[in-house]
Image (tube, rainbow, N blue to C red):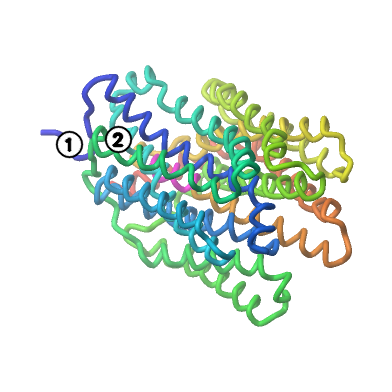
Amino acid sequence: MRSPEVALAGGPVRRNLVLGICCMSVLLVAMDVTIVNVALPAIQHDLHASLSGLQWIIDAYTLVVASLLMLSGSMSDRFGRRRVFQIGLTLFIAGSLLCSLAHNIDQLIAYRALQGLGASMLNPVALSIVANVFTEPRARARAQAVGVWGAVAGLALALGPLLGGALTQAIGWRSIFWINAPIGVITVILAAVYVPESKAARARAFDPVGQGLVFVGLTTLTYAVIEGPHSGWSSSLICALFAAAGASFVGFLLYEPRCREPLVNLRFFRSVPFSSATLLGVCVFSSFSAFLFLNALYLQQVRGFSAFHTGLSTLPLALSMMASSPWSGRLVGRYGARPSLYAAGTFFLLSTLLMTQLTPATPVAVLLVAYASFGLGLGMVNPAISNSAVAGMPLAQAGVAAAIASTSRQVGAAMGVAIAGTVVTASRTRGSSFTLATHPIWWIMTGCGAIVLFLGWVSATSWARASADLAAAELMVAVS
C-alpha cells in the first residue's frame, strides 16, 4: 500500500510536468516581488498615496507571508498538499484581480494582504509536492529539480522589472496585477489534472497561540516603525504598539518551550549555523527589499526615468543573481558556506558603499555596477543560507528548519521596507532631499554586508560545528 507521505508519479515525463506546474507558482510569487516596486511611483500618483502608504503596499503582502508560512506548511501536511496549493493559487488570483480594481490606497493594501495569504500557501507547499514526487535522490538529481526551481526564481526576478515597467508605461499600473490571472488559472487546472495528492503520515499539530503571537508581534512592530514618523515616536499609540510587539516576543519565548508541538522549536537556535542562517535571512532580505523600494522611487522621481527605463536599469541585479547562484551552489557543496558568504559580503559592501555616494547626477554606469554587485551578493548568499539552515539537522527536521529560514527572509523583507521608508521620512522632515535622505539606509546596508562577512567566518569555526551537533542530538531526542 502506498504511504500517504509519498505521492508517486508515472515516470520522468510526469514528474517533470509536476515540477513545471510547481515552478509556475514560483514565477508568480517571485515576479510579484519586483513588478510591484517598479509601479510604486505610478500608484502613488494615481491614488495620492503617502510614502507610508507605499510601504504598506509592500509590507501588507510580506507580513502575511512571513506570519503564515509555517501554518500553511502544516495545513498542507494535514489536509493535502495539492488542495492547499490550489486554494493558495485561487486566493492569489482573487487578490491580484481585486488589487487591479482598488479605488484607494486602503483597498489596495487590504487586497495585497489577501495576495499574501495566497502566496503563503504556494512556494513552501510546492516544494513539498516536488519532494514527494521526486522520491529517489537519483531522480531528483537527474531532473535537477532544485536547479530548475532556482532558475525560474531568477528568471521571474529578471522579468518583473521589465514586464512591470512596460505594462505600467503602456497600459497603467493596474495591468501588473492582471498578468497573474491567466498564469494562475492555468496552474490551478494543470494541478487538478496532473499533481498527485499527498499528505503527511503524521501531520504536526496546530499551535494557534504561537501563530497568534507571531502575527501580533510582527504586525504591531511593523506598524509602529512605519507610522512612527507621522504619529510621533512618543505618542501613546506608537508606545503601545512597541509594548505589544515586545510582549508578544517575550510571550512567544516563554510559551513555545512549554508547547507539546510548538510552531517553532527553539532548540533550533542552539545551533550556531542555523542561528546564523536566520540572521543572514533577515539582514540580506531587509537590504534587498529596501534596495528595490528606494531605487524604484529614486530612478523615477529623482532621475525622471520612465517605468520601463527603470525596469531596464535594474536588470543587471537580476541577471547577476542568476549567474552567481549556481556558482555559489557548487561552492557550498564542495567547500561549505564560508567562501560564498565571504564573496557575498564583499559584493554587498562594494554595492552599498557606491550607493552611499548617491547624488541626483550619479553616472548611470556607477548605478549599474552597484546593481550588478548587489545581485552577485544576493545570488552568492542564498545557497549558503539554505545550506546553513539544514546543516547537521536530523532529516525529519530539515523541512521545518528550511521553513524557518524562509520565514526569516520574509520578516527581513517586511522590516527592510518599513525601516527604509521611516528613515527617509525622518530625514526629509529635517529638510534633506530624497537622495540625501537615503544615505543612512545605504550605510545600514553596509553594516549588513559586514555582518555577512562576520557570519561567514563564524559559520566554519569548530564552536559552530559543535553547537550544530549538540542541537541535532537534542532535536533527535525531542522527536523520538
Q: Quadrant of residue 306?
A: top right
Is residue 268 one of those drawn in magenta? no
Which residue was labeled with disc 2?
190
Considering only vertical position in the picture, is 81 above or below 22? below
The residue shown at (67%, 64%) is 48
Residue 271 visible within the image:
yes
Q: Which mark is residue 458?
A: none
Q: Secondary structure at mark 1?
A: loop
What is the residue that sits farthest to the front in this orientation? 171
- Verify whether residue 403 appears in magenta: yes
Work out whether residue 375 or residue 188 is closer to the camera in this orientation and state it: 188
Question: Which label is found at residue 3?
Answer: 1
Q: Position of residue 264 (x, y in %)?
A: 42, 55
Tell me which amino acid carries mark 2.
Leu
Majority secondary structure in the magenta region: helix
Q: Which of the image's four quarters has the N terminus?
A: top left
* Rendered view: 416 above or below 22: below
Percent x, y of residue 45: 69, 58
Q: Amino acid at mark 1?
A: Ser
The magenta stretch is 397-406
For the residue labelled by badge 2, is the local secondary structure a helix, a strand or a loop?
A: helix
Q: Earlier in the sequence, mark 1 or mark 2?
A: 1
Q: Horizontally, is 25 left or right of 328 in the view?
A: left
- Residue at position x 55%, y 74% in the image: 244
User: Counting other residues with Cα less than 10 Å from the Cα at mark 2, is it few (<14), some (14-19), or many (20 or more)?
Assistant: some
Who's the residue at 47% across and 35% down the image?
Answer: 391
**Horizontal relation, residue 277 to residue 22: left or right:** right
- Are there few (<14), some (14-19), or many (20+) residues within 10 Å of tag 1? few
Q: Residue at x 77, y 32 (%)?
A: 368
